[in-house]
Amino acid sequence: MVTHIEHDVVTNVETERANALKTFTFDALPLQLGGSFGPVTLAYETWGTLNAAADNVVLITHALTGNTHAHDAERPHDTRVAWWNPLIGPGRFFDTSRYFVVCSNVLGGCYGSTGPSSLDPVSGQPYGMRFPVVTIRDMVRAQRRLIEHVGGRRIAMVAGGSIGGQQALEWAVAYPELVDRVIVVAATAALTAQAVAFSEVQRQAILSDPRWQQGNYAPGEGPEAGLAIARMLAMITYQSEESMEMRFARREARRVDIASPGGYADLGKRFDVEGYLYYQGNALVQRFDANSYLYISRAMDLYDVSEGYASLEAALRRVRSTALFIGIRSDFLFPAARVRWLAEQVSAVGGDATYVELDSPHGHDAFLKEWEQMNDALNTMK
Amino acid sequence: MVTHIEHDVVTNVETERANALKTFTFDALPLQLGGSFGPVTLAYETWGTLNAAADNVVLITHALTGNTHAHDAERPHDTRVAWWNPLIGPGRFFDTSRYFVVCSNVLGGCYGSTGPSSLDPVSGQPYGMRFPVVTIRDMVRAQRRLIEHVGGRRIAMVAGGSIGGQQALEWAVAYPELVDRVIVVAATAALTAQAVAFSEVQRQAILSDPRWQQGNYAPGEGPEAGLAIARMLAMITYQSEESMEMRFARREARRVDIASPGGYADLGKRFDVEGYLYYQGNALVQRFDANSYLYISRAMDLYDVSEGYASLEAALRRVRSTALFIGIRSDFLFPAARVRWLAEQVSAVGGDATYVELDSPHGHDAFLKEWEQMNDALNTMK
């Protein structure tokens, strides 16, 4: 018994180590928009074990302000501590007793991977806006190096939502020979003009904040108001008219102690939805780098799966993976109709694509909330 | 002949005078949120002649950044010089040979009426944020004083879109005995949480701009970046995914000479939609006061037709006018379903309400673009 307990303890310690943030650094990455950039460090976490054939890798790709912590083995039932927690773990869809699950922070990020807040080894200063404009394709190429580094020879599944979904799609197109199954959630072949427009307003809020200082702000002295405003707007686009009506309607805020980005008094009153947005804005400022926000959101805008190919069809014809596309009824950032259309295009050129729609009022964010529906959708692929 | 020519010339001059901006000042206005404010000046334009019975007044109410110039008698076919130009004039729906058409700048505005940029007669300084929070109801009460001033005894029609539609609705509820017909375009009983949220992000962009200076900026030294960002976001909400896809899709901008609010270089490239939004942002900065933007947009958010009544039904039961509600299929700021619902509620309590929907892809702005459909919709009321 004591031995068994000790074994458990040891196992836990090892699990904890296994789930600690690891890093992998390589010299240089050729960039889609030209030139080469390096050194590149990718931070990542893994769960489960690589099998002997090295073909059980599951790559999970995160969204705009996401990080490597898709799953928390210590608190597997807490949806707040890891962003796809209920979908990952022993016996879950992304079964860590069967797969070797990897989640890396994107190139350009601020959760351990090289990004604009990283120190340029040449100058010893943060890159700031000297960081190159990176694309979804660059992020995926960097991930490819990481998968090699961890010994993966095949990708059993690559899955992600939003910008993570763009990455999953890009994996299936860029490396068709490596990917068995691809799961693209709430992502499309390319953003709509409206989505680019929302994205650009967010960036302008950051770029116009004098504390941004051309990107050369000191840590902790960044464009807090600008980033908070960007987040406020983003949060609207992640939800829907329907869900905001359910959550807030025209209720007045009970608490008015959260400062707005501008810090000025409420005009007339404070609506509940306003207090919520201030809270969300403040929260992101505490945890995210404004320059990373600029770069990653720009990668989202710039992404077009067909770029570099003769046509969209030519790009999609490359896909060899079994593909699952998941749209969300109430998503207006990556509209369900466009996710469905993409799945149809893959089928039309001979691919094995399925489309499933989440019947959720929660808008784009449903892929981070609707656990039962997400699980059901994923299991259509089993 | 010469006399005739001279008469024509004189007529033109008189017409010009008749369409010049007039003002009316009164001492004090009791405010919905408490207290009283004055003196209040309303700037207005009129077209046509008040009849002997003084019952042929048509009041046209403008939208957020609109002004008194709903019609241009000199250039009646130019849609750019006056915002409802094709709908107003001799023989047109708002027939100036039959009606005495009045359009006033709202209380809080910056096109001649008293607003935050007006000089406080006590201090000799602009009111800035010492201007009181005004509501749609206050705007309408001020308009009521104006109608009395011009000698109107009945309102044959009151019509407007967006915030102008809120004012039209408020007229029918506040002064049912005065209004024969009311035309509410792209407006609802109250804004959705999502619309309030969009509105608040816009205001925060202004309030966070250091040049805003708590509202005490000198003329021409205001929060240009903040106001431009607010306008960029507003322009997205005035259109639709569909119309933006039609107009911009993912095309690259041909011109990159228009400065963005932040003034920083384009990241990777400039999308056409981005250049368009910069242009729109810059254009508003040239013509609109940032503090007026704060106050008028806030009035829009705060409006709830039922406020001060026992219920929505109690408010709507007051309506005695023949009411036409016009929704726009692709409007997500004032969703068509909610405009329709409002019309149904008026009918349900015994009112004479009709709903017509514009089948337009142009979003909220369709009431300023779809002239044929607007005209057809209006004529359902004839």
Image (spheres, coloured by chain):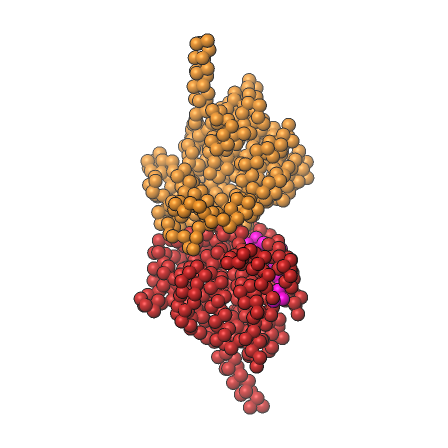
Chain colours: A red, B orange
Is A333 a magenta residue? yes
Relative horizontal placement of residue B331, taking residue A268 as reference (left or right) = right
Determine the image quadrant of residue A293.
Answer: bottom left
Seen at 60% across and 66% down, the residue is A320
Seen at 56% across and 65% down, the residue is A172
Q: Decide which of A240, A258 is in the foreground and name it.
A: A240
Task: Point out the stretch of residues depicted in magenta.
Answer: A321-335
- Reply above or below: A284 against B283: below
Q: Determine the residue located farthest toward the left in the rendered image.
A: A123
- Reply above or below: A320 against B267: below
> What is the x, y in percent for residue A36?
40, 65
Q: Name the quarter where the N terminus of chain A is drawn.
A: bottom right
- Reply above or below: A351 against B369: below
Seen at 57% across and 58% down, the residue is A314
> What is the x, y in percent for residue A339?
60, 57
- Marker count (numbered): 0
Is A31 a magenta residue? no
> What is the x, y in percent for residue A82?
53, 69
